[in-house]
Amino acid sequence: MAIVFVGIDLAKNVFAVHRVNPTGKPERVRPSVPRAKLHEMIAALPPCTIGMEACSGAHHWARLFQANCGRAGMKRSPGDGRCRSAG
């Protein structure tokens, strides 16, 4: 079955990766992918949307993924000050 979305929890040395199929169900979850293997693993996937939390390292990974893997996007975390409501 095709993969339509990949979510990555970025960290310093080990990343958590999950893939979602067209029905919206997680197809495979990898709780620990070493930094050295992340780009290799993502490059082996078919073109899909890649999502990750916006942080300083996310821009680096997004550029790598967009260059040869597909679309990569970032989302601000809910705790980010720009997302809080006034009051």
Image (spheres, grey):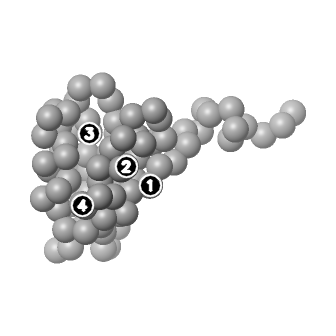
Q: Amino acid at mark 2?
A: Ala
Q: Foreground residue, 64 or 2?
A: 64
Mark number, residue 68 = 4
Of pointers 3 and 1, the one earlier in the residue sequence: 3
Alpha-carbon distance for marks 2 and 1?
7 Å
The reply to whether discs 2 and 4 touch (Cβ–Cβ < 8 Å) is no
Q: Foreground residue, 84 or 44?
A: 44
Of pointers 3 and 4, the one earlier in the residue sequence: 3
Q: Does residue 6 sit above or below 58 in this rendering?
A: below
Of pointers 2 and 4, the one earlier in the residue sequence: 2
In the rendering, at what x and y percent does residue 33 appear?
Answer: 17, 37
Q: Amino acid at mark 1?
A: Gly
The residue sitting at 33% across, 44% down in the picture is 61
Secondary structure of residue under mark 3:
strand
Q: Which residue does the numbered mark 1 point to in the structure image? A: 73
Mark number, residue 16 = 3
- Where, by quadrant of the figure, is residue 49 drawn? bottom left
Q: Amino acid at mark 3?
A: Ala
